[in-house]
Image (cartoon, rainbow, N blue to C red):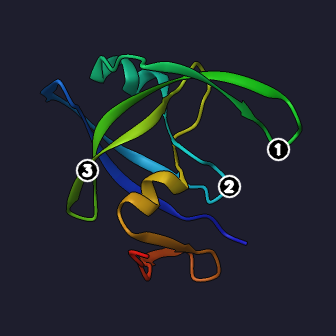
Amino acid sequence: MGTTTVTLTLKNPHDPTKTVTGQFLVDSGAHYTVVPQGMVKKLALKSAFNQKFSLADGRIMTRAIGSAVVTLEGRELPVPLVLGQKDDSALLGVTTLEAFGLMLDPFARRIYPSKLMLA
């Protein structure tokens, strides 16, 4: 199975002059989008709270949760994010995908609009 990457632009929700653009690996197993530490610093993002996460190997890690305005495929939304620490990779998680009404096709290695329901 291959990998899927997308380009995201992120803005500080309190200071839209602070923006960064980068490649993010689409990870359908990740709940939140993870922003690498360098981008967090450039954007001056602040933590709202800390959250524990279980990794695939069973380890538990704690990471800060914050938010940013994310631009994906020409659309822009504020979304919750993991504020990455040293060596954390840039990942696009399912919360962000779902917020944009998108799904991952792992076989075609692309994202596409999902069927959304209100009820």
Q: Residue furthest left?
A: 17
Q: Mark 1 or mark 2: which comes first in sequence?
A: 2
The residue tagged 3 is: 77
Q: Quadrant of the N terminus?
A: bottom right
Q: Secondary structure at mark 3?
A: strand
**76 left or right, relative to 91:** left
Q: Pointers 1 and 3 in contact (CB under 8 A)?
A: no
The residue tagged 1 is: 56
At x 38%, y 27%, the residue is 39
Q: Secondary structure at mark 2?
A: loop
- Does residue 33 sit above or below 37 in this rendering? below
Q: Nearer the viewer, mark 1 or mark 3?
A: 3
Q: Position of residue 84 (x, y in %)?
A: 53, 26
At x 78%, y 38%, the residue is 55
- Does residue 92 sit above or below 17 in this rendering? below
Between the residue at mark 1 and the residue at mark 2, the CA separation in whole angstroms equals 9 Å
Q: Amino acid at mark 3?
A: Leu
Between the residue at mark 1 and the residue at mark 3, the CA separation in whole angstroms equals 29 Å
User: Where on the picture, by quarter, is residue 19?
Assistant: top left
Q: Pointers 1 and 2 in contact (CB under 8 A)?
A: yes
**77 left or right, relative to 103:** left
- How packed mark 2 is, by other alpha carbons closer than 10 Å (few <14, some 14-19, many 20 or more), is few
User: Where on the picture, by quarter, is residue 88?
Assistant: top right
Q: Mark 2 or mark 3: which comes first in sequence?
A: 2
User: Which label is found at residue 29?
Assistant: 2
**100 left or right, relative to 56:** left
Q: Position of residue 59 (x, y in %)?
A: 85, 29
